[in-house]
Amino acid sequence: MGDVTTGHQLRLYNSLGRRMADFTPSADVVGLYSCGPTVYSFPHLGNMRPYVFADTLRRALRWKGLPVRHVTNITDVGHAVADSDTGEDKLEVAALRERRSVEEIAVLYTKAFFDDIAALNVLPADEYPRASAFVPQMIEFAARLEERGYTYLLPSGLYFDTSRSPGYGALAMMDVAGQREAARVEYVEGRRNKTDFALWRAEEPGVRRVMRWDSPWGWGAPGWHLECSVMSMALLGEHFDIHTGGVDHRELHHVNEIAQSEAYLGDGEPWVRFWLHNEFLLMNAAKIAKSAGGGPRLADLADAGYHPMAYRLFLLGGHYRSQLDFTTQAVDAAQATLRRLVTRVEPLRPLPEAGTFEAARALLADDEAGDRDKAAMAYLDQIDAAICADLATPKILAAVQEALRDPDISSEGLRVVVAAADALLGLRLADLDPRAIDRRRSLSDLDPAQVAAIERLIAERTNAREERDWYRADEIRAELDKLGVQVTDTPAGPAWELR
Ligand SMILES: [Zn+2]
């Protein structure tokens, strides 16, 4: 059992050093920065895992009574295709493809991202800074690195000299010499070390970028890594406690963020104390239809009759540091578990407020009889132990399901246990309608005008797809969705049915 008042000590797996460590905040408010989306296309299911993971961490900190300031950036400039230093910006490529302005692309896909995190019940961050709004600060940041002798200028831009950074690559545990020889990075004329990266990407002669700013190094655009250092320091202070992201960032993006930030600060202190990374979602086995222009999305799942909370439950059914295999069976199982949970919890509503360990424990202690519900207390302890053991969400799911089957727990105690588990899992056990989980319905009669309206929409959608206007195609799909119409694209053209 953990301490009666505060519970167990929160322990997190720090990628820096690759070890579990007690987490204690360094300030009154925990500064938490999560690398956010590059808004050039619809986020697919795998893209959403980092946000559900960061949300779990945030709920864990709240559970331990720690105030949090959470910042998630929106990358709307600077991210070149293939994460490289040269070449086109992802947003500019998308704008050309979809015949829209880069501003429109950013607005559309930022909205798509917000729609998905809302559907997944991710708590909103305190700030969502856009990279394009921080370019002057990025220029100042790079200028200071230049003053300190950490940079060199090439025709293709201003580069950070990683050989000047003594601890370079510690996060990735990379063998720097090996990395310098590695072929994963593209060839850049004149670059001193293969690990060196662009702080500023200069316009090629005769090529005018769409998104361009003037700088001491000529017209161009910032390098991708710069924005996260600049925006996190601007919004959380120079040093803060936790930085999160997908494990793909651990080897390059975060390594470079650390190198430039520590060079910029020059105080010999680690820039950020805890680095947490979620593993990948593998989608090879999924039979969910892919939407136009990318991998399967939350909307594809909804079209196939799955509730977004079923996807959230599927993610939380694995530990964030384990690779997860997204299969139809797995998401079916998650949907069935969700339905069972919500059906069982419905008669217990309304659930009490039990967002922190202390509040949950107090609810049990203040039981009318004055007799603490021992069974409920034991489940609460299990839940606290699980979240404190590096966010072991599968164990919380197991504990709440066991409590729901337990004949020895009082209904008041059970309500507290369920509310506590849901404060951490965010599955909306307090309000989800069990009848809304499966949205398939049998064919019903439509009048001819309704059929004609549906067919017009489908034709319009086909046109939009042919013109590669994915956003309009998606808007129409959302309209069809509201009408309960499911469209399947077949080689013979779109087929539709009612859900
Ligand atoms: Zn980042």
Image: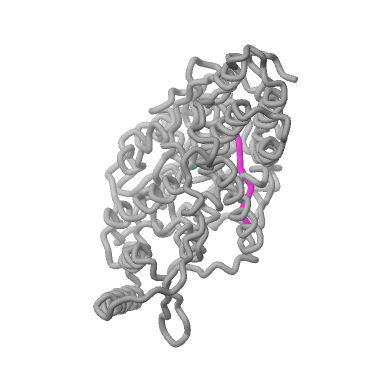
Q: Residue 206 vs residue 68: left or right?
A: left
**Magenta segment, which residues?**
276-282
Q: How many marks?
A: 0
Q: Residue furthest bottom?
A: 492
Instruction: Give the image location of residue 402, x and y in percent.
Output: 71, 38
Q: Residue furthest left?
A: 449
Coloring basis for residues: one colour
Q: Residue at x 64, y 62 (%)?
A: 327
Q: Residue furthest right?
A: 1
Q: Main secondary structure of the magenta part?
A: strand
Which residue occupies the foreground of this view, 75 or 11? 11
Please identify the quarter of the rendering in which residue 275 is found.
Answer: top right
Q: Residue 266 vs residue 15: left or right?
A: left
Residue 187 appears in the picture as rendered:
yes
Residue 252 appears in the picture as rendered:
no
Report the quarter where the C terminus lies.
bottom left
Q: Residue 433 vs residue 331: left or right?
A: left
Q: Residue at x 64, y 34 (%)?
A: 391
Magenta region includes residue 340: no
Report the quarter where the N terminus lies.
top right
Which residue occupies the foreground of this view, 155 or 90? 90
| Above or below for 62 versus 78 | above
Please identify the quarter of the rendering in which residue 97 is found.
Answer: bottom left
Instruction: Give the image location of residue 356, x and y in percent.
Output: 55, 23
Instruction: Give the image location of residue 96, x and y in percent.
Output: 32, 66
| Above or below for 409 versus 188 | above
| Above or below for 221 versus 360 | below
Instruction: Give the image location of residue 154, x and y in percent.
Output: 43, 48
Q: Residue 25 vs residue 451: left or right?
A: right
Magenta region includes residue 280: yes
